[in-house]
C-alpha cells in the first residue's frame, strides 16, 4: 500500500533555512506582504522573493498558484517555492496550495514548509498529502519515492494534532486509489478479501463470507454474477465500533467487481481495460473504514463490499435468466453487463437484515449513463430521504468533491416491469442511471434512509484533479468521513 511521505512538525527556526538542501516553501498573500520566514528567504536570495511578488506575473496569479525559483543563490536549497495564498485561507483554496507543492516536489527530495503566516496550515498539509501520490508498483524502472517534509510553525504540537485526522483521510484515500488502480490479475477476488482482512490490525472487525456462506444466506443474485469466473465470490464485512454500545450503525455498501467483461453481454474491446476500476465503490468503502480506524472515530459504522468477477464462460449467467434475490424477489437478467446492481441488492438487503442500520449508503461505478449526464465533475446522488441527502451534499461541497442530486420516481420504476419475473435488471435505453437507482431502491426498507452514489464518472479519470494525479481519485473518502464526523460521532 502507498505510504504517506513522512511529515514532521517543528518550531520555526529560521537559522536552518539557508542550509536546507531540498525545497523551501514560503507563503505570501496577494498584497505581497512577507512574513519573517519569507523575509529571511528574500534576504538570503538577495531580494528574489520580493522581485517575484512585485512582478506583473504575481498580480495575475490565482490563490494556490506557485512560482519556483530553481537553485537560488545564497541558499543550499534545490528550489524555493513561493505560494500565493491568503493568510486565513482554508478549505479548498488552502488544500490546492498544498497540492501544488506536492506536484512541484514530484515525490522526490526533502521539503521545508515555513507555515508561520498561515492560520489553517493543517489544510495545506492535508492538500499536500492528498496530491503526494503515485501508483508505481508495477514499474520495473527505479521510481521509488523518497524524502521527508518538515513543517515549521510557532505551535507545532497543536498543528500536528490538527493534522492527524486529516492525514488519516489522506491515507484512506491513498488506499482507495491503490485498490482502484490495481490490475485485475493482481487484485483478484481472493487477494482483495485478504487485503481487507489485514485491516483487523487497525482495530476493525473484519469478516469474510465465502461462497458457501453466501449460498446459505441466499445471496443468489450476487453469486450469479461471479459464476462465470474461476475466481470465487466474497462479501467482506468491516465493522468499526467507536460509538455508543448498541447504537445502530451507518452502513456503507460497495460494489467490488474486480473486472467486468460484461459477461455474455460482452463489452466492446475498446476501453475494456479500464474495467479494473469497476470495484471503485468498494474501494471507497475500504478507504473510509481505514480512515475511521486510524483516527479512532467515535461512531459506529459497518462497511460491506461484494467482491466478484464478471466473466463469460460455459457457466456464466445468460441474458434472459431469472434469479431469486436474498430478499425473495425474482429478477429477469436481460443484460449481464448490468451486474453491479445484482451484487449490491443482495449485500444491501443483508446489511439491513443483519445490522439494522440507522441509514445506508451504497457506492458503485454503476452506469455509463451517469457520465453522459454529469461528465467527470460530479457523482450522481439518489436518495429516498431529503434531509439525509442534504447532509451528504453539504459534506461533499465542504470537501470539494462534486456531487449532484438526481431524480427518482414511479414512472422510472415502471420501466423495470418484467413479463415473467418481479422485475428486469434494466429499464431500457432511457434514463439508465435513474432506472438503476430505482432497481436498488426496491431493496431498501421503507424506514431506512438511503443514498445511492453512482461514481462511474469520478472514481478514475484521464486528467488530474485538484488533489489527485491521473487515474483513481479516491473520490468519496473525504466526503463520507466528513458526513460521519458531522452527523454520527458521539460527543
Image (spheres, helix red, strand yellow):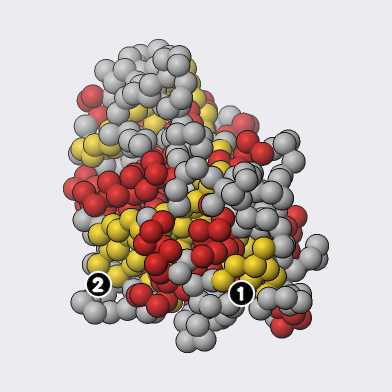
The answer to which quarter of the image holds residue 113 is top left
Q: Secondary structure at mark 1?
A: strand
Quadrant of the rendered structure where residue 98 is? top left
Q: Dividing the image into 4 quarters, which one contains the N terminus?
A: top left
- Residue 40's mark? none
- Asked if residue 56 lies left or right of residue 81, the reply is right
The tag earlier along the polypeptide, 1 or 2, is: 2
| Direction bottom: furthest residue | 447
Identified at 25% across, 59% down, the residue is 205
**Nearer to me, 138 or 479:** 138
Q: Nearer the viewer, mark 1 or mark 2?
A: 1
Residue under pointer 1: 330
Residue, x 53% and y 52% (percent of image)?
226
Read off the residue under disc 2.
243
Front residue of this view, candidates 257 and 319: 319
- How far across and how far down the image is residue 157, in percent? 19, 48
Amino acid at each position: 500500500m502507498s505510504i504517506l511521505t513522512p511529515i514532521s512538525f517543528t518550531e520555526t527556526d529560521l537559522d536552518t533555512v539557508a542550509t536546507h538542501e531540498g525545497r523551501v516553501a514560503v507563503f505570501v498573500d496577494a498584497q505581497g506582504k512577507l512574513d519573517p520566514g519569507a523575509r529571511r528567504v528574500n534576504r538570503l536570495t538577495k531580494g528574489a522573493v520580493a522581485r517575484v511578488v512585485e512582478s506583473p506575473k504575481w498580480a495575475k496569479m490565482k490563490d494556490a498558484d506557485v512560482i519556483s525559483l530553481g537553485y537560488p543563490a545564497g541558499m543550499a536549497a534545490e528550489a524555493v517555492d513561493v505560494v500565493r495564498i491568503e493568510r486565513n485561507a482554508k478549505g479548498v483554496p488552502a488544500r490546492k496550495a498544498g497540492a501544488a507543492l506536492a506536484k512541484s516536489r514530484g515525490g522526490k527530495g526533502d521539503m521545508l514548509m515555513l507555515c508561520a503566516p498561515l492560520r489553517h496550515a493543517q489544510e495545506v498539509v492535508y492538500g499536500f498529502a492528498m496530491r503526494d501520490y503515485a501508483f508505481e508498483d508495477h514499474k520495473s524502472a527505479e521510481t521509488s519515492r523518497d524524502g521527508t517534509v518538515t513543517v515549521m510553525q510557532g505551535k507545532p504540537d497543536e498543528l500536528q494534532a490538527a493534522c492527524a485526522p486529516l492525514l488519516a483521510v489522506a491515507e484512506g484515500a491513498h488506499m482507495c486509489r491503490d485498490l482502484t488502480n490495481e490490475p485485475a490479475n493482481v487484485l483478484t477476488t481472493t487477494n482483495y478479501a485478504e487485503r481487507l482482512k489485514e485491516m483487523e490490525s487497525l482495530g476493525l472487525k473484519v469478516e469474510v463470507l465465502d461462497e458457501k456462506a453466501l449460498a446459505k444466506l441466499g445471496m443468489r443474485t450476487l453469486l450469479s454474477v461471479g459464476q462465470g469466473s474461476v475466481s470465487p465470490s466474497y462479501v467482506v464485512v468491516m465493522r468499526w465500533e467507536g460509538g455508543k454500545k448498541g447504537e445502530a450503525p451507518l452502513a456503507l455498501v460497495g460494489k467490488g467487481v474486480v473486472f467486468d467483461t460484461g459477461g455474455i453481454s460482452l463489452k466492446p474491446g475498446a476501453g475494456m481495460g479500464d474495467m479494473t476500476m469497476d470495484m471503485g465503490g468498494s474501494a471507497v468503502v475500504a478507504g473510509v473504514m481505514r480512515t475511521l480506524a486510524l483516527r479512532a472515530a467515535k461512531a459506529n459504522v459497518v462497511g460491506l463490499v461484494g467482491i466478484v468477477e464478471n466473466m463469460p464462460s460455459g457457466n456464466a449467467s445468460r441474458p434472459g435468466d431469472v434469479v431469486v434475490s436474498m430478499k425473495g424477489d425474482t429478477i429477469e437478467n436481460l443484460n449481464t453487463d448490468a451486474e453491479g446492481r445484482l451484487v449490491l441488492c443482495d449485500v444491501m438487503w443483508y446489511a439491513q437484515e443483519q445490522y439494522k442500520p440507522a441509514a445506508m449508503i451504497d457506492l458503485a461505478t454503476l452506469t455509463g449513463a451517469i457520465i453522459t449526464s454529469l461528465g467527470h465533475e460530479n457523482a450522481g446522488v439518489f436518495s429516498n430521504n431529503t434531509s439525509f441527502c442534504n447532509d451528504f451534499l453539504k459534506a461533499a461541497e465542504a470537501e470539494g468533491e462534486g456531487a449532484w442530486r438526481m431524480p427518482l420516481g414511479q414512472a422510472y420504476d415502471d420501466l423495470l416491469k418484467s413479463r415473467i419475473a418481479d422485475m428486469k435488471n434494466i429499464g431500457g435505453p432511457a434514463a439508465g442511471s435513474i432506472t438503476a437507482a430505482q432497481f436498488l431502491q426496491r431493496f431498501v426498507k421503507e424506514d431506512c434512509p438511503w443514498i445511492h452514489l453512482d461514481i462511474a464518472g469520478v472514481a478514475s479519470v484521464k486528467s488530474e484533479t485538484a488533489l489527485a494525479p491521473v487515474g483513481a481519485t479516491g473520490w468519496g473518502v473525504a466526503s463520507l468521513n466528513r458526513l460521519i464526523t458531522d452527523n454520527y460521532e458521539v460527543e
